[in-house]
Structure formats: C-alpha cells, structure tokens
Image (tube, rainbow, N blue to C red):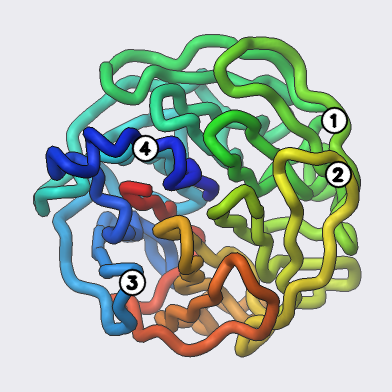
Amino acid sequence: MGLINSDVIPESAAAAGIWYGDRGVFVGGWSNAWYNTMDYISISTAGNATDFGDAIESNSYGNATSSGTRGVYQSGDSNLHYITFATTGNATDFGDRSPGWIMADSCSSGIRGVWYGGDQVVEIDYITISTTGNATSFGVITDERRTPTACGDGTRGLSMGGYSNYWGANQNIIDYITIATTGNAQDFGDLTQATSVMDATDGGGRAVVAGGQSSGATWEDTIQYITIATTGNATDFGNLTVGKYQISSCSDGTTGVFGGGRTSVSGSTGVNTIEYITIATTGNATDFGDLTQVRSQAGAGSGN
C-alpha cells in the first residue's frame, strides 16, 4: 500500500513526538490458513519483525492507509480496523467499506484515506483517518479491476495494475486522483508490463511498484517507479531478490520495504523475508530481515 510523503508531516507534529514514520506494521495474511498476526519493524534499521498484537479477525488480501499516528486496515472483507503506531496492542474496530469490496488497495493524504476498486467494482471511497465510521463514496476508477496497488504523495493518489473482471487479463493501467477532493480517476500512464497482485510504496514524490503476477502466471522480480506529480509511464528501477507476488510494503519516506509474499500458486511457497530499497535511487533490493511468520496477502502500513 502507499502512504503519505514525509514532507507533508508538519514540523510541529514531529517535534511533539506524534509522527511515527519509522515504524512499519504488517497485518494478517495467509499461508494455508488466515492469520490475525500483527508485527512491526523499524524501517530505518534492518532486522527481524517483532510482535505488535492481533487484528480483530484472521484475514488476508488486506490493505492499509495511515496518518502520522494511526493506521487503518481493511481486512479480507469490508471490515476496517485501526492501530496507533506509537503503541503495541490489538486492533480496534473503525467501521466498514461497502460489503464485498475486497481485493482493493489504498493510499492517504495523512488526513483522508482512500480505497480503490476491488472485486468486480469501480468505486473509490474514503474515510477521515482521525475519526471512526464507515467509508463514503469518492468516485470511480478508470476501469474495473481487482488486486490493483496504490500509493500517493500526500496530494495525488495513484491506482496501478490489477486484473479485469473476474480472473480476467492483467492490466498495465495507472490512474490518479486528487485526494483532497472527490471525483473520478483520470488516466496517468502505463506500467512497464501488465501486472496484478503486486504492491507499491512511496517517498520523496516517487512511487515504487514491486513484484506481482504477469501474463502466463509468471511471478515477477521487477521493480519500477513513477514520479507522482507528473503523468507518464513507469520506468525500470531494479529487481527483488526473487520473483514473488502478494507481497506487502511500506516506507519511512526514504527506505521502502517489501515483506512476505508467495513464489508459486502453492500455499506452502509463502516466504517470511523482508527486503528493502532506497526510494530516491535505482537498484536491486537487499535483504532486511524476516517477518515473525511465513505469509502473503498481508496489509502493511507505517506512520510515514
């Protein structure tokens, strides 16, 4: 999932100790069973993840959006629940998206969290992260697709890739919205190839997309990037350490991390590895550490 650019966090908030951009939290996931596990890392320091608490339900195909203090996660159904990054502990109920809008992804402005599409829907909806309550209609994406990935720079949100209809063709679509307003998404450009079930993170105005499934059930190690403030096609960034899909990602605005995922259709081929990149450069990912357990399809977010 994509999160906000650290540049939009007020200096007063950081000085007051209410910006927790260094902490990334992975929620739920699947590996022959659904999990309610939540664990966390310090993004600026490589190492293994530590237990955070439990989600409100075991889930997979989750996604997340956040402010500098709170992360809001959609589980594998319509449920939204939240955590406070500065503490550890179990998640709390937030509200709901519309029933059945699963296999979506999300981003935020730090104030407003936005969800894109999902299973056979084109709708975009949003929440105010500091409150609790159900999501509200925002607009529609440019084309129906499930398992897209999303991120943003605090002003503009991008929705990328996914596959059309029900188990349809992979897409290379990138479209965008202005998060502070409501309205329909507009065309931005194209990914380097048609891909689904990948993930994206962002920092310094750059979106970075990694992994996924391309045509012919190929598990990609591709990493590509986009400059969010412009429009145009994605550019090659480098490669993951291994081809995989259903990974989860977050960032502190400088370092992007990619955790978990699967290396084939078999449920036993999930991984617990975490790897990282420096967002402002290009190059291949490097080993970071391990999640507390093997899993894919987790939601991930950070206080950035």
Q: Earlier in the sequence, mark 3 or mark 1?
A: 3
Identify the secondary structure beneath mark 3.
loop
Which label is found at residue 44?
3
Q: Earlier in the sequence, mark 2 or mark 1?
A: 1
| Tag 3: amino acid | Ser
242 vs 291, left or right, is right
Residue 226 coordinates in the image, percent (x, y)? 75, 54
The residue positioned 40% from the left and 58% from the top of the image is: 252
Residue 10 coordinates in the image, percent (x, y)? 33, 34
Are the residues at dot 4 and dot 3 in contact (C-beta closer than 8 Å)?
A: no
| Tag 1: amino acid | Asp
Residue 96 coordinates in the image, percent (x, y)? 39, 21
Are the residues at dot 2 and dot 4 in contact (C-beta closer than 8 Å)?
A: no
Which label is found at residue 75?
none
- Distance (Cα) linking label 2 and label 1: 8 Å
The residue positioned 44% from the left and 36% from the top of the image is: 8
Q: Which residue is mark 1?
A: 143
The mark lying in front, picked from 4 and 3, is: 4
Given residues 204 and 33, the one toward you in this image is 204
Identify the secondary structure beneath mark 4.
loop
The residue positioned 44% from the left and 59% from the top of the image is: 251
Disc 4: CA contacts within 10 A as few (<14), some (14-19) or many (>=20): some
Q: Which residue is mark 2?
A: 173
Which label is found at residue 9?
4
